[in-house]
Amino acid sequence: MAYLREIITEGHPTLRKVAKRVNVGEIADPIFQQFLDDMFETMYAAPGIGLAAPQVNVSKRVFTVDLQDDEPEHGPLVLINPKFTLTEGEVEATEGCLSVPGMVGEMTRFEHVVCHALDRNGKKIELDAMGWFARCLQHEMDHLDGVLFIDKAQNLRPAATDEERAEAEAALAR
Ligand code: GNR
Ligand code: NI
């Protein structure tokens, strides 16, 4: 069974901490595996395309992603102790965040990243990511470092009108 965890929002101190690396010996622990199942459950229920452990008040360097309909080949994935080994290009798009509900802004991100991490079995993985996949990895990596998109976004605004709400929801569901 997997359980919904509460997603904390801006103002909660855990979102501003630099998360701690996961001890490799902890990955096989059933408690940690249960935690990963709960993260997926929480991410899908939100719904979101990514969720970082600090968003459920766990200050560890782990996040889940699932691009779902957009890029079915890119999910579901667990990234533990992730690190970018290549970043290049720039591209701007509208972002939202489950921990900053109702806000949207334009965010410039690297267009292409290569990311090294461990998967949920503790196995080394290398991901070559473009587009929304690359954007999502960067957004989640920022959460591990205590950074929120509102720190860097341009034209940050409440998704106040129907049009903006639709835009925010589209960004979240993507
Ligand atoms: O679901 C999410 N969608 C999204 C869209 C554009 C850029 C980043 C994201 S991540 C977000 C979920 C979330 O807040 N993860 O931390
Ligand atoms: Ni977020």
Image (tube, helix red, strand yellow):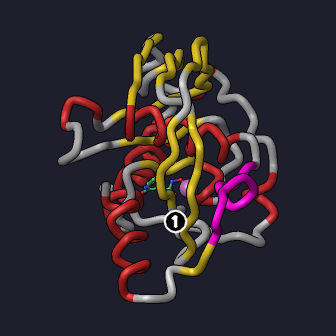
Which residue is at a point 54% across and 68% down the rendered structure image?
104
* Image height of 168 relative to 80, above or below: below
Which residue is at a point 23% across and 37% down the rendered structure image?
71
Q: In the figure, residue 66 lies in which quadrant? A: top left
Task: Point out residue 119 in the picture as x, y percentages from the top left corner.
Answer: 43, 23
Task: Point out residue 10 in the picture as x, y percentages from the top left corner.
Answer: 70, 70
* Image height of 98 relative to 103, above or below: above
Residue at the disc numbered 1: 98
Q: Nearer the viewer, residue 170 or 39?
A: 170
Q: Secondary structure at mark 1?
A: loop
Q: In the figure, residue 153 lies in which quadrant? A: bottom right
Q: Indicate yes or no whether the magenta region holds residue 138.
A: no
Answer with left or right where residue 52 lies relative to residue 67: right
Answer with left or right where residue 29 lies relative to residue 169: right
Asked if ligand 1 lies within 8 A of label 1, the reply is: yes
Q: Which residues are magenta?
A: 147-156
Numbered label tally: 1
Which residue is at a point 51% across and 32% down the rendered structure image?
29
Q: Nearer the viewer, residue 161 or 79?
A: 161
* Image height of 50 relative to 156, above or below: above
Packing grade of label 1 (10 A; few <14, some 14-19, many >=20) is: some
Q: Amino acid at mark 1?
A: Leu
* Image height of 3 relative to 102, above or below: above
Question: Could you tell me which quadrant the N terminus lies in?
Answer: bottom left
Task: Point out residue 64 in the picture as x, y percentages from the top left corner.
Answer: 44, 41
Task: Point out residue 133 in the picture as x, y percentages from the top left corner.
Answer: 39, 35
Question: Could you tell me which quadrant the C terminus lies in?
Answer: bottom left
